[in-house]
């Protein structure tokens, strides 16, 4: 741990507030600020928190949706239980994980899908942004299979190649799509959040029959970004239109 990292975190007011209020991470205040701006959580909502570890967003979701809410958190990492929520360890890109979520929902459709998911950072911005884009696109496709019409999707994004393709795909599926940068985000971070409200009953005409992933890949081709081609050594699998990361990709 570097001395600079320690000093910056020690001075971080959001981290101190999170600790004093019992939240597991400073990022809880990002969701609280998104909610204050857009009122995305209602009492009694069914909510899926993708990439929930360590649980800050799940805590806020339980708090805001109340006793009648249903909150499910999922992450590749083991996450300590959050009172009032169901926590799963699994890959959101696997059918098995989606089936476990559906069992918990027990016939209910989701009102809100949240994704504060981040890739393992390599330190190479273009690579990290590309992986983040892929994760956001994957989660959008998951959301479209589970959100009730009128539902909301929120995901973290990093500005870079392909983001406009993701925003276009979101606008084909939601009537209101906006970018928002919470005050609780670090000053040095290039992250922002895409807040997509009012899921359309049917995607707009140009998106019908297409996944968000297919639209983003088409956009990347259009702007001249080479799409990876499969080789014999490639262990990538495609499930319901989004990419599943293997250990080789990690």
Image (cartoon, rainbow, N blue to C red):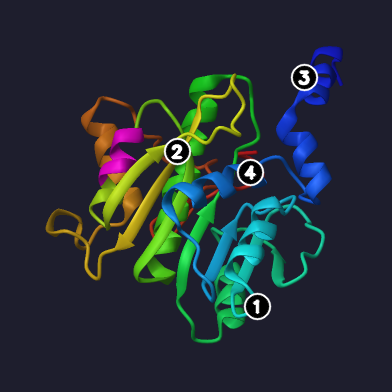
Sequence-earlier tag: 4 or 2: 4
Q: Which residue is identified by label 4?
A: 29
Between residue 154 and residue 89, name the one nearer to us: 154
In this picture, residue 187 sits left or right of residue 38:
right
Q: Which of marks 1 and 3 is nearer the N terminus?
A: 3
Is residue 61 visible to us here?
yes
Which region shows up in magenta? Answer: 163-168
Query: In front: mark 1 or mark 2?
Result: 1
Q: Which mark is residue 67?
A: 1
Density class for disc 3 (Cα within 10 Å; few <14, some 14-19, many ≥20) is few
Give residue 219's position: percent from left, percent from top: 25, 37
Task: Work out whether residue 124 or residue 14 is closer to the camera in this orientation and state it.
Answer: 14
The secondary element bearing badge 2 is classed as helix
Which residue is painted at 76% across and 39% down in the image?
17
* In-front residue for pair 134/199: 199
Residue 92 in which image quadrant: bottom right
**Inter-mark Cα distance, 3 to 2:** 28 Å
Q: In this view, does 76 lie above or below 117?
A: below
Q: Are marks 4 and 2 in contact (CB under 8 Å)?
A: no
Count of numbered marks? 4
> What is the C-alpha distance between the residues marked 1 and 3?
37 Å
Q: In terms of secondary structure, where does tag 1 sit? A: loop
**Residue 47 included in the magenta stretch of the image:** no
Residue under circle 3?
8
Q: Where is residue 165 in the image (x, y as percent from the top left)?
A: 29, 38
| Discs 4/3, front | 4
Q: In which quarter of the image is residue 250?
A: top right
Q: Position of residue 220 (x, y in %)?
A: 29, 33
Q: Name the residue under label 2.
A: 133
Query: Which element carries disc 3, helix, strand or loop?
Result: helix
């Amino acid at each position: 741990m570097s001395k600079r990292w320690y000093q910056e975190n020690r001075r971080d007011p959001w981290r101190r507030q999170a600790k004093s209020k019992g939240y597991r991470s400073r990022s809880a205040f990002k969701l609280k600020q998104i909610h204050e701006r857009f009122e995305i959580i209602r009492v009694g909502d069914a909510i899926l928190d993708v990439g929930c570890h360590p649980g800050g967003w799940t805590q806020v979701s339980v708090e805001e949706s109340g006793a009648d809410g249903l909150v499910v958190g999922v992450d590749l990492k083991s996450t300590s239980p959050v009172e009032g929520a169901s926590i799963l360890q699994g890959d959101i890109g696997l059918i098995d994980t989606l089936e476990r979520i559906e069992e918990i929902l027990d016939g209910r459709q989701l009102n809100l899908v949240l994704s504060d998911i981040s890739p393992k950072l390599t330190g190479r911005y273009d690579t990290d942004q590309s992986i983040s884009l892929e994760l956001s696109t994957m989660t959008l496709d998951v959301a479209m299979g589970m959100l009730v019409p009128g539902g909301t999707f929120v995901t973290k994004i990093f500005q870079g190649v392909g983001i406009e393709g993701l925003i276009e795909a979101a606008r084909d599926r939601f009537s209101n799509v906006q970018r928002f940068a919470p005050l609780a985000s670090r000053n040095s971070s290039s992250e922002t959040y895409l807040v997509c409200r009012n899921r359309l009953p049917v995607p707009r005409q140009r998106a019908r029959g297409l996944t968000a992933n297919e639209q983003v890949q088409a956009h990347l081709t259009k702007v001249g970004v080479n799409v990876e081609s499969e080789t014999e050594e490639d262990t990538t699998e495609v499930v319901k239109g989004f990419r599943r990361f293997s250990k080789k990709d990690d």
